[in-house]
Image (tube, coloured by chain):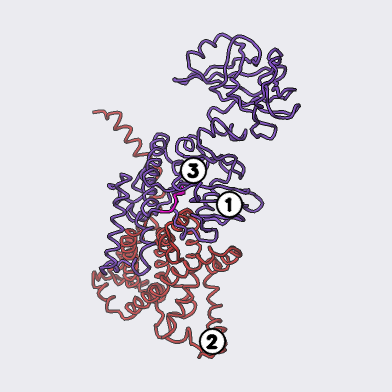
Chain colours: A purple, B red
Amino acid sequence: MTQPAIHLRDIAKSFGETRVLEGIDLAVAPGEFIALVGPSGCGKSTLLRIAAGLEPPDSGRVILDGRDVTAMRAADRDMAMVFQSYALYPHLTARQNMALPLAMRRLDGFERLPFAGLLPAVRAKRSAIQQEVASAAEMLKISPLLDRKPAQMSGGQRQRVALGRALVRHPRAFLMDEPLSNLDAALRVHMRSEIVDLHRRAGVVTLYVTHDQEEALGMADRVAVMLGGRILQVAAPDTIYRDPAHVEVASFIGSPRINLLTASLAAGGRAQVGPHVLADRIAAPTGSHIRLGIRPEHLRLEAAAGPWRLPVRLDRIEFLGAEALVHCRAEGHGEPLIARMPPAAADTLRHHPQLHAWADDAALLVFDSQGARVPRTTAAMAPAYHDA
Amino acid sequence: MTPSPRDAAAAIETRAAWRLAGPTALLMLLLLVLPTLAVLALSFTDAELGAPDITFLGLDAYTDLLSDRTFKGALRNTALYVALVAPASVLLGLGLAMLIEAEVGGRAFFRSVYFLPVVSLIVAMASVWQYLMHPSFGPINLLLRMLGFAGVNWLGSSDNVLAALALIGIWQALGFNMVLFLAGLTAIDRTLYAAAEMDGVRSAWDRFRTVTWPMLGPTTLFVTTISVINAVKVFETVATLTQGGPAKASETLLWVIYQEGFVYLHIGTASAMAVVFIALLLFLLVIQTRVLDKQVHYG
């Protein structure tokens, strides 16, 4: 990677006794869109505020374009932030809200006084600001709203003005803290593509904090999954989904949740749930406990018994239009399993209370007792196990 | 003709409304509206308590008032007092609130200290002030002399007495205004300050102008209104400390009304003064809300 636009190095932060961030490392390439995703309380917003300079880290460095800005205050870092609550100045019109960051940077205290507009030099600066506000408004399609105050606008319109306020001064980076969480569902989906489009056109590096995995997967170039103050994995959305590095990542990303089966490891790397062998060639110590992860769309259910299959009891079938979710439960195994399949396929299972679950070898994700991903050994094992 | 069911329902509702609002309306009528009307009626007469007959003076009662030097002096003194007390207590209250808000420790302590005058009895505290401001052995003058200044005859000189009373008035109003501003400050959304910082708002003054002052608008309007009303109503300190003196220099509106009505028993004159007093207050309120309300943003 070339020199990162934003480089967070070994960031740690505690609030009193609570450790919020523990040694975060994150390098964001120029122009990249990175989503920080995690459940609430995982420290993602704190990390964003540290990047912004609104919060000092206890240790670690914030580096922007190769320059250490850890000690620099937020106002001087030239980053723009979009807040969940929009944080527009309620007493100013949309136009004034958007002009404020430009006025603050380009005009001194005297030039911001109302009567200073009588001076030609100041008037020129001010009209330049107004033009930039107008063109940013054009881009966001909010020109007709410019003379309204925030109270006279809908949530979506306010969020656009907040985006405009960030966009108008061509900052070094966009920092977005759950910008869509206060919008209703339909508008949220719509604004997602608008923000992605905006990012593509502006080409500015973006750090986007969200608790919504759909937003993260759908918008970002790369997704950083945060849990308990750590980044567990940073990767492209499809990698995060198909190839999770940790069982926590696997279970946080994906809806419905990934099926997890606790298994013990017998000789030959064979994973056993009770007496049933489900996989082999797993590179973990014999006797240890592992977890097998199977995405709902990879869980196969059939009436017929056979080797490598786990007997399950059918709970119920949930039809969701284009697809169906089949809920079942392994005998002697508490956690319910969910299989995603076409409704027609689910329908054929309806009259079979006793089913058998299995998954393609390639679709099985194996995690060790610590939760880390375990590879399969490449060496072919004796086929004798298949009859176990 | 029988009433339609809808009309009947409306009638029932109207009766219920009157039954519910009735007691309060009656009390307001008895205690507020009728006395005010009585005062208004009396203000056009030369009524005196104990005098056998009443003459109707009409508007002459008011033109007499305009040429009354005592009343004009009281108007001028009250205006001066309000001009000193209201702005100072509002601005100092805001300043104190911001200092306390910024303070990490000792918040509760400072809040209580500055709020004490509000809960203390001003008539009792007046004697303390009398001692503090005593020209020869008062601690204020002792301190001034220690610092090399000449002592000031606070309450005994007609040049200083209004300023001295204003000082006490500010001391009294400060704590209340501070508490209101503190409440206003805590209600400000912290993310606005974060947004301002991201927008390049660097200095404390710009932060105040961009966020604090506009967001405090409703609080400031309320505090200013209350402060003006309270200052116009100044009475206790005048009655206990100066009796309007020396040489009428501290006669204020309420004091003069009290004197006319309760000491000289000139009910008619006192009523006319009271009407002017009420009109003045209402006028101030209307001006204030009209002018300020336009510039105030309500969250």
Amino acid type, residue under disc 3 in the picture: Ile
Q: Chain of mark 2?
A: B
Q: Residue at x 50, y 51 (%)?
A: A3
In the rendered structure, which segment of residues is drawn in magenta?
Answer: A171-175
- Magenta includes A174? yes
Residue annotated with mark 1: A9
Residue A35 screen position, x and y as percent: 49, 42
| Secondary structure of residue under mark 1 | strand
Residue in the foreground of this view, choosing between B28 and A270: A270
Q: Chain of mark 1?
A: A
Q: Residue at x 60, y 40 (%)?
A: A232
Residue in the foreground of this view, choosing between B231 and A306: A306
Q: Is residue A19 above or below residue A344?
A: below
10 Å crowding of disc 3: few (<14), some (14-19), many (20+) = many
Q: Quadrant of the N terminus of chain B?
A: top left
Q: Residue at x 38, y 53 (%)?
A: A170
| Secondary structure of residue under mark 2 | helix
Residue annotated with mark 3: A34
Amino acid type, residue under disc 2 in the picture: Leu
The Cα–Cα distance between marks 2 and 1, rounded to whole angstroms, is 60 Å
Residue A291 screen position, x and y as percent: 66, 28
10 Å crowding of disc 1: few (<14), some (14-19), many (20+) = some
- Magenta includes A242? no
